[in-house]
Image: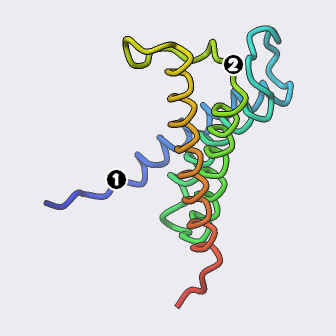
């Protein structure tokens, strides 16, 4: 079974949409978009990185196939940002932000389990970042 590649027009639309989504949190983090500071529960760099993930996704959708080396650079930036966000959540986020979990075990243990899983995701993101960087610097045949 083969899959048809997504048409460039669709990728452009989704890429522009993703870039627009990412501009809002980035705008909030640099002060272009004014919000009540009480509603921002993370450091501004985390908010900027969240927006940057969407922007890099959009850039990769639009130009990634045409410029593979640039795509590797964008992938390194994207996964590095995802790893940084996950690291901040795993180590520094407020325990009140964690909900759900395994029934019948203490909430503190559920929070610890959640932090461990998020930390594992951060490590995976950083490993993918290293791979993307090696692909970026790899000599083309």
Q: Residue at x 85, y 30 (%)?
A: 30
From this viewpoint, which residue is outermost toward the bottom?
141
Q: Residue at x 74, y 10 (%)?
A: 39
| Horizontal and vertical percent position of residue 124 | 53, 52
Q: Residue at x 40, y 45 (%)?
A: 10
How far separated are the C-alphas under marks 2 and 1? 40 Å
Q: Residues within 10 Å of mark 1 (few under 14, many from 20)?
A: few
From this viewpoint, which residue is outermost toward the right?
31
> Which residue lies under the disc numbered 1?
6
> Which residue lies under the disc numbered 2?
94
Q: Comparing marks 2 and 1, which lies closer to the viewer?
A: 2
Secondary structure found at label 2: loop
Tag 2–tag 1 contact (CB < 8 Å) = no
Q: Earlier in the sequence, mark 2 or mark 1?
A: 1
Against 43, is 121 above or below?
Answer: below
On residue 106, the disc is: none
Q: Quadrant of the N terminus?
A: bottom left
| Horizontal and vertical percent position of residue 57 | 55, 47
Nearest the camera: 140 or 94? Answer: 94
| Horizontal and vertical percent position of residue 29 | 80, 28
Against 109, is 20 above or below?
Answer: below
Indicate left or right for 32 with 77 as reference.
Answer: right
Against 45, is 128 above or below?
Answer: below
In this picture the colour scheme is: rainbow
Q: Residues within 10 Å of mark 2 (few under 14, many from 20)?
A: few
| Horizontal and vertical percent position of residue 120 | 53, 44
Secondary structure found at label 1: loop
Tally the numbered discs: 2
């Amino acid at each position: 079974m083969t899959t048809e590649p997504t048409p460039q027009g669709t990728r452009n639309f989704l890429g522009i949409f993703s870039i627009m989504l990412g501009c809002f949190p980035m705008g909030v983090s640099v002060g272009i978009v004014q919000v009540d500071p009480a509603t921002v529960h993370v450091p501004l760099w985390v908010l900027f990185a969240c927006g940057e993930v969407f922007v890099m996704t959009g850039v990769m959708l639009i130009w990634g196939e045409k410029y593979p080396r640039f795509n590797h650079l964008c992938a390194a930036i994207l996964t590095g940002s995802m790893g940084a966000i996950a690291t901040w959540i795993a180590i520094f986020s407020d325990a009140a932000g964690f909900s759900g979990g395994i029934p019948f075990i203490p909430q503190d243990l559920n929070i610890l389990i959640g932090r461990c899983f998020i930390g594992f995701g951060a490590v995976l993101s950083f490993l993918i970042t290293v791979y993307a960087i090696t692909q970026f610097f790899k000599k083309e045949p």
